[in-house]
Amino acid sequence: FLVKFDSDGNLVNQTFYNSSGEGGRKISLDGAGKIIIGGYVNDNDSLSFIALKYEQNLDFVWASRYGQGIAGQEVIDMSVDINSNIILTSTNIISTDYETVKIGSNGVVEWSKLYNSTSGWDFGRAVVTDNFGNVYVTGHTGLSGFPLFSRMTTIKYSPEGEELWMQSYADSLDGWNAKDIAIDNSSNLYVVGWTYNESNIAAIKYNSEGSFQWSITYNGPGNSTDNPSAIDVDPNGNVYTTGNSFDESSGYDIAVIKYTQAPTNVESEDKSPSSFSLKQNYPNPFNPSTKINWQSPVSGHQTLKIYDLLGNEVATLIDEYKPVGNYEVDFNATALSSGIYFYRIAIHSDKLQSGEFVETKKMTLLK
């Protein structure tokens, strides 16, 4: 159902798109001023993406559908890029992966991507595009049934759908869950979400290359539940988040927060590492899951593999290009027997005289 009003609030026109069952979730204008709607359609009891295009007079132009099995009807986000392409993101509930699709200005699907983290429990929440047509998707990843392991995970795709980088973040041992994403004129990214245990509003900033800049949390005056709804940034770089904050005396209040660059209460020190390091896993010994942390001062192709005591490879946790940064991955050894195992990081970069950095550490699985 699409309704158009003039600037005085008078009804100009209205129209319907009718199929087996659908709902609009996002609306925008493309570069030509045409109206774009993103949402879902119910095909044989399975939800699919749908994008609709209308003229300014509400004449129908086209409808484009894609996929089956996307998640709840509410959690669908859309961005229209500089070339009037449409990008939709949500969660594929069948595989519990981020699902992102790009639809051209003519209604033809150009590409689709599923993101499956090593932990395997992934929920796509929001999408934004930059002035070059790059696509940024955020959400949260973690282990089913373990909310404290949840992390805000953000991915950058090229206009052609190539994954350029992925960053995952959570501070301390609390779970961080993403809700919305914004981008400034320099392609810096801002993600807002909430912390599971402390129930605070949390925001982080990355630069366009995926390097962490700062993070901050907001605990409302009631020291209770704080929930974010959206994030945005103005031309001066001021960051705004909105949501609600609970106080026993007044109930749920609207919360609007403004941060300047760089906020004085933000963890603003440079976290880009200056050296290589592979940390000891924790917990160790473990059963059945443990976390592995490492850092790299150079961009390059990284592999993280697990070996048994005989040197046999039993798992590959990472095999992809990554920018400068600090990283953490969860390793689940449910399928393995008790014993000594080794994890090995290899980082290949033409910036290194030797061509690569390699380090190995030992860990113990006790069942």
Image (spheres, helix red, strand yellow):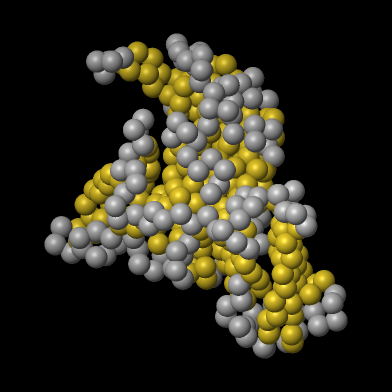
Residue 75 appears in the figure: no
Which quadrant of the figure has residue 2? Answer: top left
Residue 213 is situated, as x and y percent measured from the top left of the image, at: 45, 50
In the displayed structure, does residue 81 sit left or right of residue 254?
right
Q: Residue at x 58, y 78 (%)?
A: 282
Q: Which residue is outermost to the top?
A: 57
For the N terminus, the image quarter is: top left
Q: Residue at x 74, y 80 (%)?
A: 341
Q: In this view of the protein, which residue sits in the foreground, 58 or 105?
A: 105
Q: Which residue is outermost to the front?
A: 353
Residue 19 is situated, as x and y percent measured from the top left of the image, at: 57, 30
Residue 81 is situated, as x and y percent measured from the top left of the image, at: 54, 27
Residue 346 appears in the figure: yes
Q: Residue at x 14, y 62 (%)?
A: 249
- Does residue 248 sit above or below 360 in this rendering? above
Q: In this view of the protein, which residue sits in the foreground, 21 or 128?
A: 128
Q: In this view of the protein, which residue sits in the foreground, 244 or 49?
A: 244
Q: Residue at x 55, y 47 (%)?
A: 210
**Count of all numbered marks drawn on residues in the image:** 0
- Does residue 23 sit above or below 3 in this rendering? below
In the displayed structure, does residue 33 sit left or right of residue 347?
left
For the C terminus, the image quarter is: bottom right
Q: In this view of the protein, which residue sits in the foreground, 365 or 242?
A: 365
In the displayed structure, does residue 26 sit left or right of residue 354?
left
